[in-house]
Image (tube, rainbow, N blue to C red):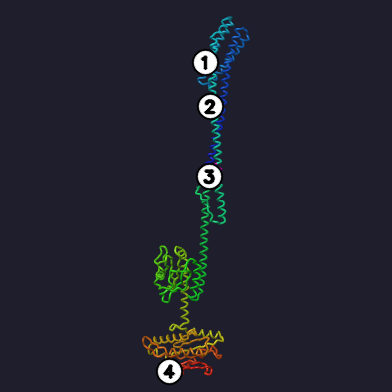
Amino acid sequence: MRISTITNWAYWVTVVLTLLSGGAFIMAVRGADQERDAATTAWKLDEIAEQLQSAAEQTTEDARLYVLKGEQRYLAAFGGAKTQENARQQVIKRMDAGLLTEQERKALQTAETDAERLDAIEEQAVMDYTDGNVDKARAALLSPEHEEAQSGLLSSVTHFTDLVDARAQEDLRAAKEKADLWGLTAKALLALTALVFLSVLYFVLKRRVAQPLLQMSGVVRRLAKQDYTVELLADDRRDEIGDMNEAIQIFRDNGLERDRLDAELRKDRQIKDLILQLMHRLQACQDGAELAPIMARYAIQIFPNLSGHLFFMNEGRTVAVAASTWGAPTRSTLDFPSVQCWGLRRGRPHLSEIEHGDVPCQHLEEDSADGGLCMPLAAHGDTVGMVYFEQSSGASDLLDARVYIELIAENLGLAIANLQLRDRLTNLAIKDPLTGLLNRRSLDENLNRLRREATDLPAALMMVDIDHFKRFNDDFGHDAGDFVMNQVAAIMTDVTGARGTVHRFGGEEFAIVMPGSGKAAVATVAEAIRVAVEKAPITYLGRPLGTVTISVGVAATDSSQPAATLMQRADQALLRAKANGRNAVATDWNVDEGFTQSISRRI
């Protein structure tokens, strides 16, 4: 029940009880008045009866004395007493109108009859004495008849007095009981009023208001300090205090929800900041080998409860190979055919082994209950890789992180595609599309670099030309000619190794730059290349193409020769090798400086 209802009820109950107790006190006072009135009435009736009896006795005495002594003073006293007796009788008659009961009225009438009878005897005796009949008068006053009348009067007066006393005592007792009852009722009502007041003070003000408010004040102070872990009152009461407690509960719940949302917002902001940092790093990567470890470094920071792999697709988009790993993934293999992954097949994210999940991918272990997410990396309409995440059994981090993973995957796929596109564009810009060697533009850059650096380290350049190359095109077709160039390019690359870079200069001509190599070293490599080409059996489509030979011109920066003239000097040396019968190596330095030249006989 609400406190306002309780207080209203208590107020009106107190008012009613107060009014009732006041009424009871009034009735008690009236009862006391009635008791006093009954006592007064009884006293008056007793006094009148006593006076009536005394007057009868006095009248009889005066009448006898007058008859016996004949003195006039007794006659006067008899007349006065008679007058007083008549006056009292008139008072009794007036009282008979409303103060006497029926029985008392009859007793009074009997007393009046007896009094009249006695008065008649005495008055007759007085008259007889006055008339001179002294003996008759005396005989009448001393006769048995007079005695009987006097005794009857005294008896009737006594009976009337007893009746009046009995009734007076009964009235007094009833009035007293009534007054006592009303007094007790008034006291009980007053005590009940006090009890109600004290109950309101204790149960309402103390138990239902003061104590809960004291407890709630501590709760409110802690909530004001944003301590939302405080436990509220376990009270299901439906009153104002209950409303306040419910409002505080709502405030606490809102505070907890706000803290939860703030924590989620901070976590979301932190994750997005890390993702933004990752995006910046990915955009600055130069190749996939640099990109993969950066992805692993940031993935473990963004998703500390998840582990996984970053897969790159091969050129044919048939195999996915793990480029980096974070955490401790256990389900997926490190390389697998693309058809084993439902995500790569469909080009869409694929969940495996999650509650109500999809069909597990074939590259995952089937006996594991851990969840796995395959997120294809696509850009420009091409799938360039896949990012894979997995979680421990029963966790929900994978589902919660899916939005962020999709955001990372979108930018990661674009970054990988851009790197691959840049690699392809770079290859187109610096490499020969037929042989895969560096092209003329790369050769010019390398030579310009040698000119700019101008170090004390030696450098050398070989110019190579395939002898009589036109005959391969004429005799076997241009495809066979292209095949010969590829074979010669492969041999030069294998023999040169890491000591230099092989370029296709144009047509069937090649150039080999060897920084850090002196005359003897470059001459040895040139001769090794010439011999390797000459001895290589070259067959195209099952047909032997015959012996292939090359002519080589070598130039070096030893003996203070400048790097700026390497191309001209190597080209002049190549012309001399061709002029000397081809299948030869010619250098631009003199014989007395260690010149060696080997010329093979023409085939």
Where the C terminus falls, by quadrant? bottom left
Tag nearer the camera, 4 or 3? 4
Residue 78 covered by magenta stretch: no
Q: Which residue is mark 3?
A: 4
**Mark 1 or mark 4, which has the lower sequence index?**
1
Q: Which residues are magenta?
A: 199-208
**Mark 3 or mark 2, which has the lower sequence index?**
3
Measured Cα–Cα span from mark 4 to mark 2: 168 Å
Amino acid carrying mark 3 in the image: Ser
Residue under the image location 58 percent in, 22 percent down: 43
Measured Cα–Cα span from mark 1 to mark 2: 28 Å
Amino acid carrying mark 2 in the image: Ala
Q: Which residue is mark 1?
A: 110
**Mark 1 or mark 2, which has the lower sequence index?**
1
Label 2 Cα neighbours within 10 Å, binned few <14 / some 14-19 / many ≥20: some
Look at the numbered disc 3 and give the secondary structure of its residue. helix
Q: Which residue is mark 4?
A: 602
Looking at the picture, how far across and down is residue 330, in whole percent? 44, 69
Look at the numbered disc 2 and give the secondary structure of its residue. helix
Question: Of the numbered discs in the image, which one, if any, rests on residue 89?
Answer: none
Tell whether label 2 touches label 4 (CB within 8 Å).
no
Q: Answer with left or right where residue 546 lies relative to residue 257.
A: left
Residue under the image location 53 percent in, 41 percent down: 10
Label 3 Cα neighbours within 10 Å, binned few <14 / some 14-19 / many ≥20: few
Measured Cα–Cα span from mark 3 to mark 2: 45 Å
Label 1 Cα neighbours within 10 Å, binned few <14 / some 14-19 / many ≥20: some
